[in-house]
Image: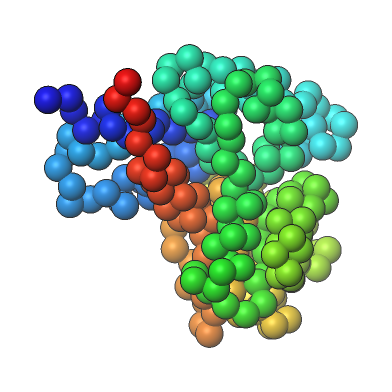
Amino acid sequence: MKGSHAKMRRAGVLGGMGPEATVVFLEKFYSLTRGRREQARPALLVDIDPGVPDRNEAWRGSGTSPAAALARMGQTLRQAGADFCVMACITAHGFVESFEEMAGIPLIRMPDVVAEALGAGTVASGAVGLLATTTTLEMNLFQKAFAARNSSLIVPEEKDQEALMRAIYSIKKGESARSDVLAVAKSLVARGAQTVLLGCTDLSVLGPLHLWGCTVVDALDLLAARTLAEIEQTPKSAG
């Protein structure tokens, strides 16, 4: 009898942006299948490449676009047997317009996954405050996804956003920035956010954030659940 993996699709993970965020995604993904027999748990194909050009520098014109590097990773994952890809970085989604054509493999876009989950009201409700990179905000990645579902977002004020970006780069270097991130999150709650969305995967490295009177949603949790659902929803044909 063939093993369980022969019946499941395989996801390819574009990672390394940053490496710790990818590791957190893998932990979240496999936590969803705890209790299963080891051989019945899904296989993931993972490409962790911290050398992908900085997405924020690329957006500002001071660095190389990561588009080609992402496409190469997608090609590698497709050739290794992936049926579709996910990416453990949100800002990089602003550079994937030609990804599927260049890599020859579908990409599940995290801003859409998040907007679908929050828009359905099954994860959280009320006004959503967004913690994300400045580039993600300027690209309108979440704004477009939420607007398509008639949902609105509250984003940090300028000084708070600048503080958040400093915190994100501190996290990338392995430094602690929990208090700074919490301060920005609390400012969103004070402005009416009933849900705070961790919309940068580096923020997931901090672990759970707890805010009084507010639900905190981690975009990586939603991506992990969607990835598992995609793997299990459409089995490979035996022929």
Which residue, as the protein is rendered here, is positioned at the far left?
A: 1
- Which residue is painted at 86% across and 37% down in the image? 60
- Residues 38 and 133: in front is 38
**Residue 117, can we see it?**
yes
Of the pair 40 and 92, the residue shown nearer to us = 40
Q: Is residue 62 left or right of residue 115?
A: right
Q: Quadrant of residue 146?
A: bottom right
Q: 218 and 32: which one is in front? A: 32
Residue 155 in the image: above or below residue 73: below
In the displayed image of the protein, which residue is found farthest to the front? 239
Picture quadrant of residue 172: top right
Residue 18 visible in the current orientation:
no
Quarter where residue 199 is shown? bottom right
- Residue drawn at x 74%, y 60% is 148
* On-image quarter of the N terminus: top left
* Pick the front one: 124 or 161: 124
Up/down of 221 relative to 88, above or below:
below
Q: Could you tell me which residue is drawn at 41 percent across and 27 percent down?
A: 45
* Image point (50%, 32%), residue name: 84
Q: How many marks?
A: 0
Q: Residue 22, image x and y in percent?
A: 47, 39
Horizontal and vertical percent for residue 29? 37, 46
Residue 42: give x, y in percent of width and height. Answer: 30, 37
Q: Position of residue 153 (x, y in %)?
A: 73, 69
The image shows residue 186, relative to residue 176, as above or below, that is: below
